[in-house]
Image (cartoon, coloured by chain):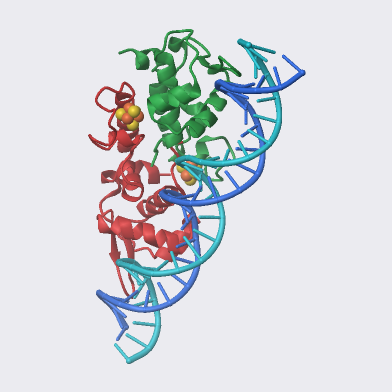
Chain colours: A green, B red, C cyan, D blue
Amino acid sequence: MMELTRKGEYAIRGIVYLAAQPPDRVCLLSDIAAAVDVPATFLAKIFQQFSKIGLVKSYRGTGGGFLLGRTPEKITLLEVVEAVEGPIIPNRCVVGAGECVRDVSCKVHPVWKRVQGQVRDVLAGVTLKELSEE
Amino acid sequence: MMELTRKGEYAIRGIVYLAAQPPDRVCLLSDIAAAVDVPATFLAKIFQQFSKIGLVKSYRGTGGGFLLGRTPEKITLLEVVEAVEGPIIPNRCVVGAGECVRDVSCKVHPVWKRVQGQVRDVLAGVTLKELSEE
DNA sequence: CCTAACAAGACATTTTTTATCCTTTTAGGG
DNA sequence: CCCTAAAAGGATAAAAAATGTCTTGTTAGG
Ligand code: SF4
Ligand code: SF4
């Protein structure tokens, strides 16, 4: 239960690698993939998701590649994870009202809310800066 | 990410229902299943898992059924969840050393440890007693 | 020995994960 | 203007996990 998928793990490895590079070094996807040992085609999909929400900037054509969208200290692990895995949902009832008919009186419901909060807090408390320093 | 499966949700609903019954009322699986709206055959599998580790006691034959293995205040939500979902594993590297070749120097690794700890703490802090009181 | 009830294992279906491939778009350089 | 580099996007496929069903076996009571 509660396991990060490979996609999530790959996403983190990829963007942490990017964060560890000199600030304006444009990185090729193929280089990142090789460095962090992830299938290049799969990492491509991941970085496309990053790109759409501005976590990374992408440049096409010769001399193209990827750059971090913001400075590493402004990107949290929570953002990275949620970018590819979607929101942190320990149980479907935390999505919103109406997901479960029992949620009004359910005693378990608030527990999942608490779990969600704790996980989010931990992940939001870590930035790419800390993760990329050696 | 991090979503409880139906199995886990069903497990909780089933055992919370059992905890809400009078202490020595033997409950039929079919009754529990109907009460908590879970497919009876699926719930059977779940209760078999509970039974193996003593979370519930089972009796076969006429007049048989299920009883809670311990008093509700001695059973935590963590036990229930782990009984059917396995241990709380936010990322495979928290399973143990050697799961990931990078774990020695990895900065992300301790974050997952922290997540694991927080989730376990929340779930371990809730007992069936609290969940079954109205 | 007949019936009630759980146990156990095999099987089937659906969904999710984990990719791969192909075509398109964008950009730079000669 | 073409050629090449590189990312974007979409379709597809294989593998794994989740979700559930079915059949048969076991245990106990009457
Ligand atoms: S925890 Fe309660 S509210 Fe949430 S899905 Fe389960 S029954 Fe519904
Ligand atoms: S977080 Fe680090 S140690 Fe854990 S699986 Fe990822 S790379 Fe390996």
Q: Residue at x 53, y 14 (%)?
A: A69
Instruction: Find ligand 2 in the image and state its quadrant.
Output: top left
Whether residue A106 is visible to the viewer of this picture, yes or no, is: no
- Pick the residue in front: B85 or B16: B85
Instruction: Please name the residue shown 56% across and 16% down the image.
Output: A64
Quadrant (top left, top right, bottom left, bottom right) of the C terminus of chain B: top left
Q: Residue furthest left?
A: B97
Asked if residue B30 is positioned above or below residue A4 in the image, the reply reads below
Q: Is residue A67 above or below residue B117?
A: above
Nearer-the-camera pick, A14 or D3: D3
Q: Using the image as rendered, state which of residue A63 and residue B52 is in the foreground.
A: A63
Number of numbered labels in the structure image: 0
C29 vs B55, nearest the viewer: C29
Q: Position of residue A11 (x, y in %)?
A: 45, 27
B86 over B37 or under it: above or below: above
Which residue is at 45% across, 21% downward? A15
Q: Quadrant of residue B3?
A: top left
- Describe residue B31's horizontal placement relative to residue A56 as left or right: left
Q: Is residue D3 left or right of residue A15?
A: right
Residue A63, given in percent of the width and then of the height, sits at: 55, 14
Query: B113 left or right of C13?
Result: left
Percent x, y of residue A106: 47, 42
Percent of width and height locating residue A6: 42, 36
Q: Is residue B131 visible to us here? A: yes
